[in-house]
Each structure stands twice: as C-alpha cells, then as structure tokens.
Image (spheres, rainbow, N blue to C red):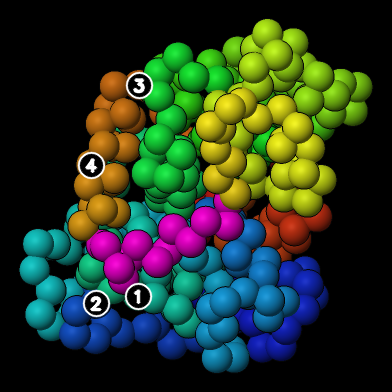
Amino acid sequence: MRAWQVHELGEPCDVLTLADIPDPEPGPGQVLVRVRAAAANFPDVLMCRGGYQVRPPLPFTPGIELCGEIVALGGQVTGFAVGDRVLGGPSLPSGGYAELAIMDAGSVFPAPEGLDDAEAAAFFITYQTGWFGLHRRARLAAGETLLVHAAAGGVGSGAVQLGRAAGARVIGVVRGERKAEVARALGADVVVDRLSQDFVEVVKEVTGGRGADVVYDPVGGDSYARSTKCIAFEGRIPVVGLHWGLYQTKEPQAIRDCHAQLSKLVADGLIRPLIGERLGLAGVADGVQRLADGRTVGRVVFTP
C-alpha cells in the first residue's frame, strides 16, 4: 500500500515521505480499514516534530483521525463486520495517512449516516473535545454567552456549532474578513475580527458589562490572558489542551455516550464539520504543513 512515513523528526513538509510499504495486518482486538478519508490535526504536526506526548517509533505513519471501511477483522473482535463504515483513531504507528490502517476495536465508532466520508473523518476529535470541554467541564447552559477563539478553525468551528445547539449566544473571534464570513455562516451571533476590533471591549459591550459565561480557547497565550478581562462572575475558561484522550482509558463509556449524543445532533441538522479543503493522498505533506503554519480554514481532509 501507499503510506506517508516519517523517518526523521522535523517540519511536516521536510520529513513526510510517500512510500510503498507492506499492508498492515490486524492483531487480536483490531480491525483493518481501507481509509476513505483522514483529517489533519495539530497533533500530527507535533508528532512530525517530536513534540507530542505520544511518540511512535520511527518510521511511523501519522494521521490520528479517519473514516474507513472495515476490510478485515482480527481475533476476538465482536460487534463489527467487514464493510462497516466507521470512524475514530487508528493504532499508531499505522496512522491514517495511508491507503490502509489498523484500528483498535475499542476506538472504532459507527460513522453517522448524515456525514460524507470527509466530514466523518473530521467529526470525532473536534466534536468530542468540544463536547467534553463545553458540557462536561464548563457546564454550558442555554441562555449563557459563549466566547470562541479561532472560531473559523477546525476546533473553534465545532465549538460555535455546539454552542448554538446548546442554546447559548455565541461570540466568535477570528483574524480577517474571510474567516469572519465563515464564522457568521457557522451561526455565530457576534463576530469579532481581531485585526480591527478588541474582543474584550466587544464582549463587555454586547453583555452589558457582565462578560462571557464560558470562553472556549484553542489558542492560549495572549488570548487566554485577555479573556480573563471579560469573563463573567463564575465564568469558565476551558483551554483546549484539556486531556480529552485520557477519557479513552479512564472512562471509555463517556466517549461512547458522547458519540451517540453527537450523532443525534448530526441527524437533527444542528452540527456538521466545516471542511475547508479536500485533498488527495498526494497533498498530505503540503496540507499538514499549512495547518502547522496557521494557513487553513476549517478542517483539511485527505481522501485516498
């Protein structure tokens, strides 16, 4: 099969190499999937650089999120069949930037029927992280004000939709008019262009001085520091670096329950991943590098 591999650490455009390698084989408790689509995530960038908490042995194939079709079952796998369309995280070092990938059966979920392959590939991490951040940790309630940084990005766009679905008033912060248009289309009630507006002042103005009840911050740094200047009494600021992945080992049923609730929101037409670009397998190195450089809108997805 064809797969992108990292043989040495560095910037994605420098270290990702497309190669022909042997097809992987599923072991006990695993499934083999034909990759229908794989989404770019910032942890893929960090793994290429060697800066992520998960460090697969070299060489490895990145790509931590995919939609695929099951083509073979390992031993002791129940509840799935060859031909099922599924999504989730592959088992590294057999990542999603390839024609085939290995997945642990416990990390496999049915792909919602209302999403195409690219949307399904970009559905899992963004919305799971958003759900746990906004509902499990921040307890966002209907009628509250939610401030979302990087509202046109992959993580922020999902938070805008989840906030709207929860009945919150959503203020989206972006950089530039192009991204402002995207945030408006996603349903943000108020959009702040950081290039020409001060989000602290806008939040105070639209809330009558009360501030935002919840701030969803996938940016950090100055964005976080300044958010503390416009947070309401008893406000909450989940920083996206919250360790969602730990729930997979500590409380896996919570992830399954979350997937069911998110799938219902898809069926009800309330959430849908924002796909900024759909690229072929040959576009992986360039697409992941542009994500690293902050030059993408929404999610970048590769379709082998």
Earlier residue among tags 3 and 1: 1
Residue to which mark 4 is pinned: 260
For the residues labelled 2 and 1, the Cα–Cα distance comes to 7 Å
Earlier residue among tags 2 and 3: 2
Q: Is residue 1 left or right of residue 156?
A: left
Of circles 3 and 1, the one toward us is 3
Q: In this view of the protein, which residue sits in the foreground, 178 or 134?
A: 134
Mark 1 burial class by Cα count in 10 Å: few <14, some 14-19, many 20+: many
**What residue appears at the point 61 percent right and 26 percent down from the top-left corner?**
232
Q: Decide whether the magenta segment is chiefly helix, strand or loop.
A: helix
Residue to which mark 2 is pinned: 30
For the residues labelled 3 and 4, the Cα–Cα distance comes to 14 Å
Mark 1: secondary structure: strand
Disc 2 + disc 1, Cβ < 8 Å: yes
Of circles 2 and 4, the one toward us is 4
Q: In this view of the protein, which residue sits in the foreground, 163 or 22?
A: 163
Q: Is residue 217 above or below residue 52?
A: above
* Dot 3 amino acid type: Gly
For the residues labelled 2 and 4, the Cα–Cα distance comes to 22 Å
**What residue appears at the point 77 percent right and 79 percent down from the top-left corner?**
10
- Boundaries of the magenta span: 240-252
* Dot 1 amino acid type: Ile
Earlier residue among tags 3 and 4: 4
> Which image quadrant is residue 205 in?
top right
Earlier residue among tags 1 and 4: 1
Residue 91 seen in render: yes
> Which image quadrant is residue 227 in?
top right
Mark 3 burial class by Cα count in 10 Å: few <14, some 14-19, many 20+: few
Residue to which mark 1 is pinned: 102
For the residues labelled 2 and 3, the Cα–Cα distance comes to 32 Å
